[in-house]
Image: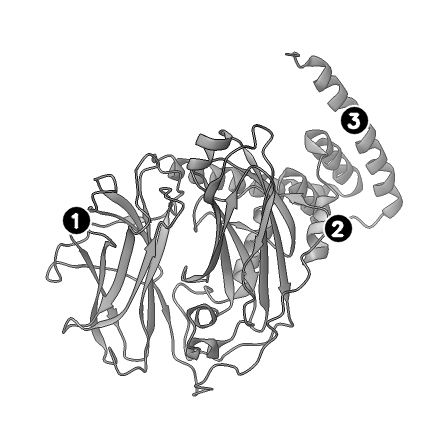
């Protein structure tokens, strides 16, 4: 996959001139192929445009978070009697007041494991405390909590999306029966006097995991390579982030750069297969302004698994000079990791998209300015993929634990020049000499066009 992105990167900078030259080349070499490629390119461009528009519209809610464009709006009940049903595979949008709980319900089979991730999104201008956040639990019909999870804002004191996951594990003594289960969502500190009053938006995305065709290991893998690898040192490539889980930008192995402003949260998704290990390092670049001062927990890098469950995080204090930190080593992805006693190891229990979420605290602007600030992510995926477990059915949504589904977005997230490259490949051009000649023409034409554009720009 690294080769794929290196190849794509080689086409960056061609712009519109390259696209016109590409269309001309395809027309000369193969009219039929050109027509098909043009249609595919137009379709991809339209899809990318629509996706970008949807993401921008969803993020334009005063919070900066991009909710899934196909969410269903539901109102949580104040008690279990009126709890509204949730369907696995559907993404919901709701609200959470500063006091009181909100109830939703699920119908689950005895052998179905359920995960209900809830992302709470406070207003961007809210004041929050380190201890506040959300708590999510799943309860059975007798009020027994199967599991609960809490996510807090932490030392950065920055209003940002926080995600907690309620879970019902099939096969355990608690909550073992089929029937109705209740998802209970509440603030971690009800009626906090140090957090701005008012409701928070919620995104809820329930997932179910089927049983295995036959019982496997019931203990976590004994040993694995816990050594930290050398960080990647290849040339960085720019990659704009998404603004939510649903719009997370796919990343493969490599060194990736982007910009971030104080208060902003960036979302990336890394495909990690069964048997593979993910390593990630984050760098925050030096400021171009006054470097005096210090911001505690200025940058946070969090890792979430394919059901948006928390895996690990790391924070950086910032004094205006460049800083770097890495996530702790993680075990290879394995079904049996769920039996580990440590939460981090237990969370690496299925293949799919692992989310890297980067947040720069709003307090950074007060000390070092509004930015933007440079962020570098060094992403490494080690290990040989294996087939993984044999499920007796399909998870919902389908493909959530399928790494090919996560990789499917890698092409769609590429820039215009990558689209041109894919169109070229789709055209089936077999004449290398002609291609080299046209590439030379592209380069010259693109450079002249850029010189003309620069000459026309007003100077300050």
> Tag 1's secondary structure?
loop
Q: Is there a contact, CB below 8 Å, between mark 2 and mark 1?
A: no
Q: Nearer the viewer, residue 263 or 351?
A: 263
Question: Which residue appears farthest toward the front when viewing the image?
Answer: 292
Residue 422 percent coordinates (x, y): 68, 47
> Where residue 411 sits: x, y (%)?
60, 50
Determine which residue is flagged by label 1: 99
The residue that appears at 26% across and 83% down in the rendered structure is 173
Near-viewer residue (397 or 460)? 460
Q: CA distance from mark 2 to mark 1?
A: 61 Å
Label 3 packing within 10 angstroms: few (<14), some (14-19), many (20+):
some
Whether pointer 2 and pointer 3 mark residues with C-beta atoms closer than 8 Å, the reply is no
Cα–Cα span, label 1 and label 3: 60 Å
Q: Which quadrant holds the C terminus?
A: top right
- To which residue does mark 2 refer? 428
Quarter-of-image position of residue 392: bottom left
Q: From this viewpoint, which residue is outermost toward the left?
A: 81
* Residue 394 in view: yes
* Label 1 environment density (alpha carbons within 10 Å; few <14, some 14–19, many ≥20): some
């Amino acid at each position: 996959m690294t080769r794929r992105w290196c190849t794509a990167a080689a086409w960056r900078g061609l712009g519109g001139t390259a696209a016109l030259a590409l269309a001309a080349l395809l027309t000369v070499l193969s009219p039929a192929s050109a027509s098909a490629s043009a249609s595919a390119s137009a379709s991809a461009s339209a899809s990318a445009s629509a996706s970008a528009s949807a993401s921008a519209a969803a993020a334009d809610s005063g919070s900066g978070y991009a909710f899934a464009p196909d969410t269903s709006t539901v109102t949580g009940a104040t008690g279990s009697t009126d709890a509204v049903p949730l369907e696995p595979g559907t993404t919901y949008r709701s609200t959470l007041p500063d006091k009181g709980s909100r109830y939703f319900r699920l119908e689950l089979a005895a052998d179905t494991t359920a995960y209900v991730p809830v992302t709470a999104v406070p207003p961007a201008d809210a004041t929050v405390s380190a201890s506040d956040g959300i708590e999510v639990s799943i309860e059975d019909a007798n009020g027994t909590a199967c599991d609960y999870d809490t996510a807090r804002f932490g030392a950065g004191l920055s209003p940002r999306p926080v995600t907690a996951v309620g879970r019902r594990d099939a096969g355990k003594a608690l909550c073992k029966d089929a029937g109705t289960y209740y998802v209970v969502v509440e603030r971690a500190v009800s009626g906090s006097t140090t957090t701005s009053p008012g409701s928070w938006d919620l995104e809820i995305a329930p997932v179910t995991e089927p049983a295995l065709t036959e019982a496997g290991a019931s203990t976590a893998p004994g040993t694995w390579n816990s050594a930290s690898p050398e960080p990647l040192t290849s040339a960085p490539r720019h990659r704009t982030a998404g603004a939510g889980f649903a719009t997370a930008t796919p990343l493969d192995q490599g060194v990736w750069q982007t910009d971030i402003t104080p208060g902003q949260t960036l979302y990336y998704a890394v495909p990690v297969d069964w048997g593979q290990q993910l390593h990630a390092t984050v760098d925050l670049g030096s400021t171009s302004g006054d470097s005096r001062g210090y911001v505690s927990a200025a940058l946070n890098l969090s890792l979430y698994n394919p059901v948006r469950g928390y895996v690990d995080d790391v924070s950086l204090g910032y004094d205006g000079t460049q800083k770097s930190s890495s996530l702790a080593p993680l075990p290879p992805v394995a079904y049996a990791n769920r039996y580990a006693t440590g939460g981090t190891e237990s969370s690496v229990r299925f293949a799919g998209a692992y989310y890297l979420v980067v947040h720069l605290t709003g307090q950074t602007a007060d000390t070092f300015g509004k930015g933007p600030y440079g962020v570098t992510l060094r992403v490494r995926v080690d290990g040989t993929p294996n087939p993984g477990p044999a499920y007796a059915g399909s998870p919902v949504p389908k493909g959530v634990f399928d790494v090919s589904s996560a990789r499917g977005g890698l092409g769609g997230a590429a820039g215009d020049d990558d689209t041109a490259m894919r169109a070229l490949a789709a055209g089936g051009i077999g004449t290398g000499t002609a291609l080299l000649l046209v590439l030379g023409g592209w380069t010259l034409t693109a450079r002249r066009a850029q010189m003309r554009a620069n000459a026309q720009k007003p100077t300050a």
